[in-house]
Amino acid sequence: MIAEREFVDSVTEEDFKIIRSLPPFNATSEAALREAFEHAGTGYYGIGDIVSDEEYFPKGLCIVMKGVIVAENRTETHVIALNAFMKGDVFGAAALFVNKDSRYTSFVVAKRPTRLVVIPEEAIIKLISTRPKFAVAYSAFLTSKIRFLNRKISGYTAKSSVRALLQYLEVACAEDDDGVAKINISAVADELNMSRTTVYSAADTLEEAGFIKRDGKYYTLLRK
């Protein structure tokens, strides 16, 4: 189990401006969001630091202000990258509104020096209960997460070549500041022990399904 962190450093005005533009926070008033920010804090992580594991997770919505973190599923033999979060991404909804004995669903690991702003559960509850527009926006935010998860499940249950390429791109995109995988098909084919034709076919399947956007040799992993 990792040690609990205290998110004590205050957030900045620049943080506020960025977060106010993001769903679901862009659906509430400036005054209400500033009140929530009075309880927010900042956390810093180095490369390889664990943000969350099965037993510890920040109790609040987390916003990536800098860096890259990746949610992973870990077994004794495999580590599967489930999702990557970059600057401006919001995560942590799965840790809200659960009892103290609940376990988190995955490991979340910093892949680059990372700074998070955490808005605690109590502040989110107050926004939901007192600001109807925020409550609707938060529901829409959760719905988009569910749709994304359903698509991800379909990708990971697809035929092995598609699943292998999706996993490869998940890791490759997480390692790039802009979330773009600059890959060579021949090199990928060698690493995955597949033919170039198979890799191209798998990439076409992922693009048609809305998982990736391709521009020549470059691939951007779509996250919504």
Image (cartoon, rainbow, N blue to C red):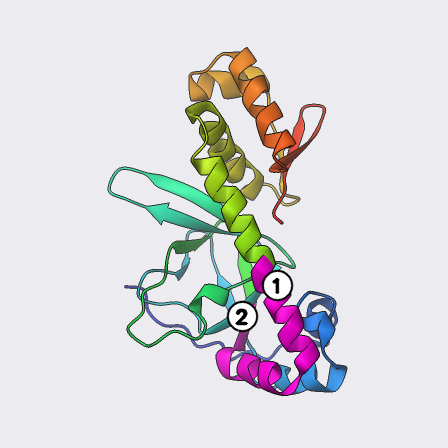
| Residue 117 sits in quarter | bottom right
Mark 1 lies on residue: 141
Left or right: residue 133 versus residue 157 is right
Residue 5 visible in the current orientation: yes
Work out which quarter of the rendered image holds the N terminus and state it. Answer: bottom left
Find residue 187 and report its horizontal and vertical position in percent: 52, 18
Residue 90 visible in the current orientation: no
Residue type at the position of mark 1: Phe
Find residue 156 and report its horizontal and vertical position in percent: 44, 37
**How many numbered marks are there?**
2
| Residue 63 sits in quarter | bottom right
Residue type at the position of mark 2: Leu
Asked if residue 80 is among those painted magenta in the image, a careful observer would answer: no
Q: Residue at x 51, y 50 (%)?
A: 149
Magenta span: 117-143
Circle 1 SS class: helix
134 versus 90 height, above or below:
below
Find residue 36 and report its horizontal and vertical position in percent: 62, 83
Judged from this view, the residue extending furthest toward the left is: 76
Left or right: residue 155 versus residue 32 is left
Left or right: residue 144 versus residue 3 is right
Disc 1 crowd rating (10 Å Cα; few below 14, some 14-19, many 20+) is some
Secondary structure mainly formed by the magenta segment: helix
- Nearest to the eye among marks 2 and 1: give it: 1
Mark 2 lies on residue: 61
Circle 2 SS class: strand
Along the line of sight, the residue nearer the viewer: 17 or 22: 22
Q: Tags 2 and 1 in contact by the CB under 8 Å rule?
A: no
181 versus 52 height, above or below:
above
Find residue 131 and report its horizontal and vertical position in percent: 66, 83
The residues tagged by marks 2 and 1 sit, at their Cα atoms, a distance apart of 12 Å
